């Protein structure tokens, strides 16, 4: 589990996803300027039109990552290493646009019609958003005026599970636990794979899998060494060298 909120904004084309994200980013910039939102947008559009749409999210995000048919682009106010995994993003809040097939975090559904609720709902809905008023029995719809309320909800209820589907939480998959968390019947803390405690090793573009014993041993050796150095504080550790 990453130690900060995460949510995906999901919906069909022209359902208001980018407009909603712009509103969320503006609200955060105004009300919580200390937060550094990291946005990853999955675009079906070819470049350059996909890039133009993505640029709309840039003014108030610390980093925007665009995934396009032709490849990916990272738009950032400063030089950062390109994150390979969402767990490695630099920021305090992760916002995904698109990513319908990722089921380990809650989502805000952007709807153009009640029928789309039938097609897109998965039990992971933190909220539903629509540009125009409509009635869906049992569903509370937020409109553009309610974006600050939606933003507060994602800050308190957003999360991202690791996606290992290991069963350590007693559920058969991360998706199953995610659904229970969204329903208020479980907590993200039930995930036994807390990535803030996890050690990860990447060689080139390949992330190595470490079992619990090896990972703990490596972390203990590095921690013990670092603690002998002057000025070592707390926080994530990054060590880079070439094999
Ligand atoms: S403990 Fe549960 S939520 Fe965590 S990685 Fe394993 S299956 Fe997923």
Image (cartoon, grey):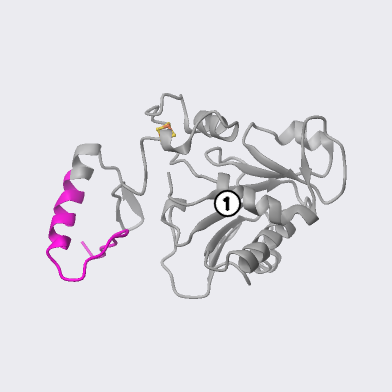
Q: Quadrant of the N terminus?
A: top left
Residue 98 showing in the rendered view: no
Q: What kind of element bears circle 1? A: helix
Q: Residue at x 14, y 52 (%)?
A: 221
Does residue 143 lie above or below 113 as drawn?
below
Where residue 39 appears, x then y in whole percent? 57, 59
Q: In which quarter of the image is ligand 1?
A: top left
- In percent of width and height, residue 196 lies at 35, 49
Query: What is the count of numbered marks?
Result: 1
Q: Say whether residue 144 is left or right of residue 152.
A: right
Instruction: Locate residue 147: give its quadrant.
Output: bottom right
CB at mark 1 closer than 8 A to ligand 1?
A: no
Above or below residue 32? Residue 149 is above
Q: What stretch is highlighted in magenta?
A: 217-243
The answer to whether residue 26 shows anywhere in this view is yes
Q: In this view, does 23 lie to the left or right of 232?
A: right
Name which quarter of the figure residue 54 lies in: bottom right
Q: Rate crowding at label 1 as few (under 14), some (14 to 19) or many (20 or more) other CA atoms within 10 Å.
A: some
- Measuring from the top left, give residue 98's x and y in whole percent: 64, 49
The residue that mark 1 highlights is: 155
């Amino acid at each position: 589990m990453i130690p900060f909120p995460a949510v995906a904004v999901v919906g069909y084309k022209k359902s208001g996803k980018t407009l909603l994200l712009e509103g969320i980013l503006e609200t955060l910039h105004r009300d919580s300027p200390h937060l550094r939102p990291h946005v990853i947008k999955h675009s079906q559009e070819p470049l350059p039109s996909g890039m133009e749409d993505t640029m709309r999210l840039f003014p108030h995000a610390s980093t925007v990552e665009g995934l396009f048919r032709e490849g990916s682009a990272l738009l950032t106010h400063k030089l950062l290493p390109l994150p390979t995994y969402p767990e490695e993003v630099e920021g305090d809040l992760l916002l995904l646009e698109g990513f319908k097939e990722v089921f380990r975090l809650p989502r805000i559904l952007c709807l153009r019609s009640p029928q789309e609720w039938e097609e897109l709902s998965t039990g992971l809905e933190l909220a539903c958003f629509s540009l125009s008023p409509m009635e869906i029995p049992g569903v509370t719809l937020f409109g553009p005026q309610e974006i600050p309320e939606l933003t507060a909800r994602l800050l308190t209820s957003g999360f991202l599970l690791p996606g290992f589907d290991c069963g350590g939480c007693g559920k058969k998959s991360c998706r199953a636990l995610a659904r229970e968390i969204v329903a208020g019947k479980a907590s993200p803390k039930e995930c036994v794979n807390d990535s803030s405690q996890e050690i990860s090793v990447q060689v080139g573009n390949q992330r190595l899998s470490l079992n619990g014993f090896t990972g703990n041993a490596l972390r203990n050796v590095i921690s013990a060494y670092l603690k002998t150095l002057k000025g070592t504080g707390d926080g994530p550790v990054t060590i880079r060298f070439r094999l």
